[in-house]
Image (spheres, rainbow, N blue to C red):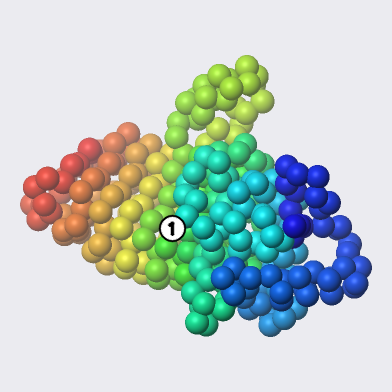
Amino acid sequence: MNFGMKRASASPSLPRSPSIIFFLWLFLLFQESTAENATLDPSEGISLYLSLLFTVKALNSIFQKWDLEAVPLWNISGEPCSGSAIDDTEFESDANNPAIKCDCSYDDNTTCHITQLRVHALNKTGVILEEFKAFTYIMVFKLDMNYFTGPLPSFIGNLSQLTYLSVSHNALSGTIPKELGNLKELLMFDIYCQNPMLILMIFVVNTFFIYAIQSIGSNNFSGTLPPEIGNLVKLQQIYIDSSGVAGEIPSTFAKLQDMKVMYATDVLITGKIPDFIGDWTSLSLCKLKENNNNNFTFKTLSVDDKASFFI
């Protein structure tokens, strides 16, 4: 009934320094547990059979360090890929947070991979943890609307299956890692954070304690957008509002021909808005207001007449 996560029940949590006997028991438990005859893939963590233990340890460590509790819908059998992780429970459901989703169709329905992970609006603090390196099959990675600090780690660029990455509404800092250009399957990239005063107002309504969060109201990235993001030719949506990035829109973005939505308000965009945006024929919404670019001119647009531009 327990795979090392804190939960609302009275089940004991995984010891921080478990014995060899406990690890052997845990390994046997995972070998016997099934999700329609599927078990968590041992290669999800570090290597073969021992990697299964390391994956569980990584998941446990994430929950301990971020003080998270598994919801009752999820951990019902001791196997992470069980309950709401594999049934019809909506991934975005308020009752299913934090959440994972597993795909148990691998190897003729005998192997599960964790493919989605969500920690949404739970007021969590800390950094984006190294333990996430273990989840190499993750496709949806959502840590939005918390108070995470520190950099956006470069190892995220190794999570090659990612299609949806959202770290919006946090207090992250540092430069955007160029390694994100390795995420060739990425469809949506969201580092947006709303206006710090708006976050402050929401926090005040909830807690009546004003000054505690004034310094963490917005993501505070620095530097320019990496040209390597132009390699993400499947990218359809990018949100960099109030993110702290600055400089010109990289010329490599001309390759983003599938772009549908671009939000870049309240950032220090400089130089001319590139003509190639007019060639993004799938574009439906482009917001470039409230920045330092006073040269809002395009060549004759070839995008759909229904596209909306706020410049």
Task: Answer left or right for 148 relative to 103.
Answer: right
Q: Residue at x 68, y 64 (%)?
A: 79
Q: Quadrant of residue 129?
A: bottom right
| Crowding at mark 1 (Cα within 10 Å: few <14, some 14-19, many 20+) | many
Eyeballing the image, is 287 above or below 56? above
Front-most of 19 and 10?
10
Eyeballing the image, is 44 above or below 224? below
* Residue 223 seen in this snapshot: no
Q: Residue at x 79, y 69 (%)?
A: 26
Eyeballing the image, is 44 above or below 173? below
Front-most of 217 and 248?
217
Q: Residue at x 33, y 61 (%)?
A: 235
Q: Secondary structure at mark 1?
A: strand
Q: Position of residue 63 (x, y in %)?
A: 71, 51
The amino acid marked with disc number 1 is Tyr
Residue under label 1, please give it: 164
Q: Residue at x 45, y 31 (%)?
A: 195
Eyeballing the image, is 14 above or below 107? above
**Given the current orientation, which residue lies at the most extreme front position?**
36
